[in-house]
Amino acid sequence: MAVPKKIIIDTDPGIDDAMAIFVALRSPEVEVIGLTTIYGNVYTTLATRNALHLLEVAGRTDIPVAEGSHVTVTKGTKLRIADFVHGADGLGNQNFPPPIGKPIEQSAAAFLVQQANLYPGEVTVVALGPLTNIALAIQLDPSFTKNIGQIVLLGGAFAVNGNVNPASEANEFPLSTLRDAADIVFTSGADVLAVGINVTHQVVFTDADRKKLAASGGKFAQYLCKILDVYFSYHHNAYSTKGVYLHDPTALLAAVNPSLITYTEGVVRVQTIGITRGLTLFYNKQKRFAEVTEWSDRPVVKVAVTVDAPTVVKLVMERLMDS
């Protein structure tokens, strides 16, 4: 057996975050060494509460939780929160009792930097929410981009319509007109793999899958079946689908098993103003441009193109039912 890959999950739980966290904890290929929290599906304080709660449900209170930023990388306080997708509590309006545990004293950015320094080249960050904590880690310690093994992020739309507006995917929607967190991460020089909704929309967890999950005896399966109603209702209404998209579990499994996806490489920039705010623009570098622009000499990142959707769903089902 290979040594498990160390991962930190940067998360905004979130129903599909809960699913991804549980799948990670049931994946022998990885060792979850921490959760860091961020606003997105819920505000950061609630994201921290939910992360602690999920670890208590899983019996993994040994895993530290570091609370992330409550504001954008440019100190903006106007945040876009997706409670209409996940419920007011982020977990399907179940109003679970508060967790017993507390987050560690370190901020998320400081924890990310510390772990990258402790295990240079060995830690993968799986970023399931807006990229503020990752950008702050880069600003806190410029060597973070060299010390971190890889950043696998859920983000971008890449030639399909976004899910905030036709241009933007939720995690890349900038909340100020200044250079935003996503653009900082994409141009940082770190080893970045972006898993966008062009890929995650290929992975559908159907109503039939949900029934199969409910019929199983798995602890995680039973927990998720309690919280999935809101998420399914949103997808039925918004997309007219008989199922839900597995955004976060797909990104997580791309980190666990990279053979599940194919990718292309190029430069990615994020539009921060106008009606295309949040648009992820991909430059494949096939053409050389004579003039110097904001695209010149930017680091190359990986962008997922295809995914083995049946295997992703199969792995999610197996790991949740066998829990």
Image: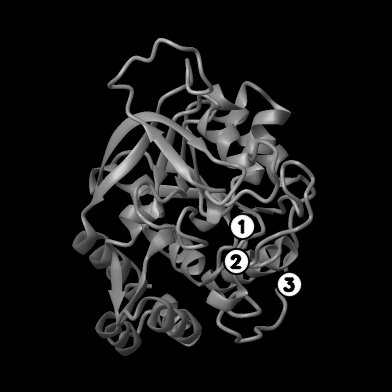
Q: Looking at the picture, how far across and down is residue 142, in whole percent?
A: 65, 22
Horizontally, is 266 left or right of 310 in the view?
A: right
Q: CA distance from mark 3 to mark 1?
A: 13 Å
- The residue shown at (27%, 84%) is 212
Identify the residue shown where x is 59% and y is 45%. Answer: 131
Q: CA distance from mark 2 to mark 1?
A: 25 Å
Residue under label 3: 100
Which residue is disc 2 drawn over? 41
Q: Few, some or many C-alpha atoms within 10 Å of disc 3 (few <14, some 14-19, many ≥20)? A: few
Q: Can see residue 26?
A: no
When asked about the image quadrant of residue 139, the answer is top right
- Identify the mark nearer the N-term, 3 or 2: 2
The quadrant the C terminus occupies is: bottom left
Residue type of the residue flagged with mark 1: Asp
Q: Judge the density around disc 2: few (<14), some (14-19), many (≥20) Cα neighbours within 10 Å.
A: many
Q: In which quadrant of the rendered image does the N terminus lie?
A: top left
Marks 2,1: beta carbons within 8 A: no
Asked which secondary structure carries label 2, the reply is: loop
Reading the image, the residue beneath label 1 is 62
Is 180 in front, or is 244?
A: 180
Element type at marker 3?
loop
Residue 181 in percent (x, y) is at 63, 40
- The percent coordinates of residue 293 (x first, y second) are 51, 19
In this view, the residue in front, 66 or 163, is 163
* Amino acid type at image mark 3: Ile
